[in-house]
Image (tube, rainbow, N blue to C red):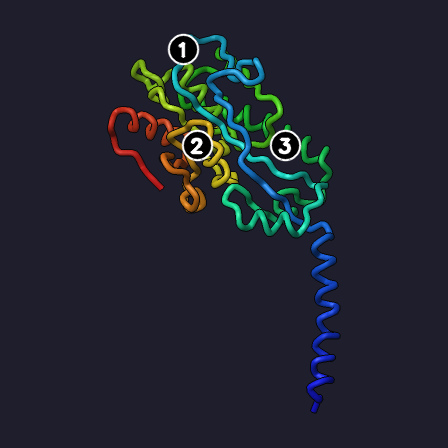
C-alpha cells in the first residue's frame, strides 16, 4: 500500500505527461475546418458589375425583389487550426467546427479544391438551366441562358439559379414577380429534372440571409431540423424538394395559399 507521500508523488508524476499532452495539443494544428456565414448574391441582379442571369431568345421580364443564393466561408485545407480556435468555434452560433476530411476529402490541396468547386459550379449552372427551361416548357435550342457568378464555387446555388430563370421568363405566371417583391434566399443543389438536394451549412447560410435582408429562406426538406436549430428571428423557413414545389410555395406565399413550413 502506498504511503500518503508516495501516493501524492505518484499523482504528480502521472500528471506531468497529461499537462504536456494538453500543451502539445494547444499549439499543434488540429484536423478541423472552421466555417462562418459567407456572402449572398441576388441572382436577379448583378455581381461585381456583371449580370448574373442573361437570357436571349425569349422575352425577359423586369423583376422586383431578390432571390439570394447563400454561401459559407470555410478555412482552407492547408490552414492550421489550433485548439483555442476549435473551442471558440464550439461555443459560437456563428461558427461551425467540422472534421477537415468531411469538407476536403482525400487530403486535396487548395488548388485541387478550387478546381473541383469550379467544376461543380459549372455543372450546377447547366443543370439549373435545363431544369428551369424544362419546367417552363421552353425549347433550350431557342432560349439561351448564360449564368455568371465569379469567385463562387460548388453546386449549392442550383435551386436559386433555376428560380431566377423562371422569374425572369415567367414570374409568378400571372404577371407578377415570383418573389412577390420580397427578398427570398435559399440553398440547394438541383438536377436537370428539378429535384432539389441537400448541401450542408444551412444554419450558417440562414444567418447570412437574415443579415442581408431576406425574410424567406428555401431549405432542402431534409435539412429543416438543422435550419430550425438556429433560425434568425424574422426569417421564415420553407422546405422544398422540387423546383415545381418551390415555385408553388412562393406563389402561395404571395396569394395567401397554404405554404409548407419546417
Number of marks present in the image shown: 3
- Residue pictured at 43% horizontal, 42% vertical: 227
- In the image, taking residue 124 as reference, residue 136 lies left or right, namely left
User: As rendered, which of 60 and 228 lies closer to the eye?
Assistant: 228
The quadrant of the image that shows the N terminus is: bottom right
Q: Secondary structure at mark 2?
A: helix
The x, y position of residue 117, in whole percent, is 63, 32
Q: Is residue 100 above or below residue 242?
A: below
Q: CA distance from mark 1 to mark 2?
A: 25 Å
Q: Tell me the quarter of the picture where residue 60 sits.
A: top left
Looking at the image, is mark 1 or mark 2 earlier in the sequence? 1
Looking at the image, is mark 2 or mark 3 earlier in the sequence? 3
- Residue pictured at 58% horizontal, 48% vertical: 88
- In the image, taking residue 92 as reference, residue 103 lies left or right, namely right
The x, y position of residue 189, in whole percent, is 50, 33
Looking at the image, is mark 1 or mark 3 earlier in the sequence? 1
Q: Identify the residue under disc 2.
A: 210
User: As rendered, which of 128 and 31 lies closer to the eye?
Assistant: 31
Task: Select label 2 or label 3 by which is in front.
Answer: 2
Q: Identify the residue under disc 1.
A: 62
User: As rendered, which of 259 and 119 lies closer to the eye?
Assistant: 259
Amino acid at each position: 500500500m502506498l504511503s500518503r507521500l508516495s501516493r501524492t508523488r505518484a499523482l504528480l508524476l502521472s500528471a506531468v505527461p497529461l499537462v504536456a499532452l494538453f500543451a502539445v495539443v494547444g499549439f499543434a494544428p488540429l484536423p478541423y475546418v472552421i466555417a462562418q456565414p459567407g456572402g449572398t448574391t441576388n441572382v436577379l441582379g448583378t455581381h461585381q458589375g456583371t449580370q448574373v442571369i442573361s437570357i436571349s431568345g425569349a422575352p425577359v421580364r423586369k423583376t422586383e425583389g431578390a432571390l439570394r443564393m447563400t454561401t459559407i466561408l470555410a478555412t482552407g485545407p492547408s490552414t492550421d487550426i489550433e485548439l483555442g480556435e476549435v473551442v471558440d468555434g464550439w461555443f459560437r452560433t456563428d461558427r461551425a467546427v467540422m472534421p477537415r476530411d468531411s469538407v476536403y476529402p482525400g487530403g486535396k490541396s487548395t488548388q485541387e479544391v478550387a478546381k473541383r468547386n469550379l467544376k461543380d459550379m459549372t455543372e450546377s449552372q447547366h443543370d439549373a438551366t435545363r431544369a428551369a427551361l424544362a419546367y417552363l416548357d421552353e425549347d433550350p435550342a431557342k432560349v439561351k441562358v448564360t449564368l455568371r457568378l465569379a469567385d463562387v464555387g460548388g453546386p449549392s446555388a442550383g435551386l436559386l439559379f433555376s428560380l431566377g430563370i423562371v422569374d425572369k421568363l415567367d414570374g409568378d405566371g400571372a404577371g407578377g414577380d415570383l418573389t412577390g417583391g420580397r427578398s427570398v434566399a435559399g440553398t440547394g443543389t438541383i438536377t436537370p429534372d428539378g429535384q432539389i438536394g441537400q448541401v450542408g451549412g444551412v444554419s450558417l447560410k440562414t444567418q447570412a440571409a437574415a443579415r442581408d435582408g431576406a425574410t424567406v429562406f428555401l431549405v432542402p426538406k431534409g435539412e429543416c431540423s438543422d435550419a430550425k436549430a438556429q433560425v434568425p428571428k424574422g426569417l421564415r423557413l420553407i422546405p422544398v424538394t422540387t423546383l415545381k414545389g418551390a415555385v408553388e410555395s412562393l406563389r402561395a406565399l404571395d396569394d395567401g395559399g397554404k405554404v409548407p413550413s419546417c
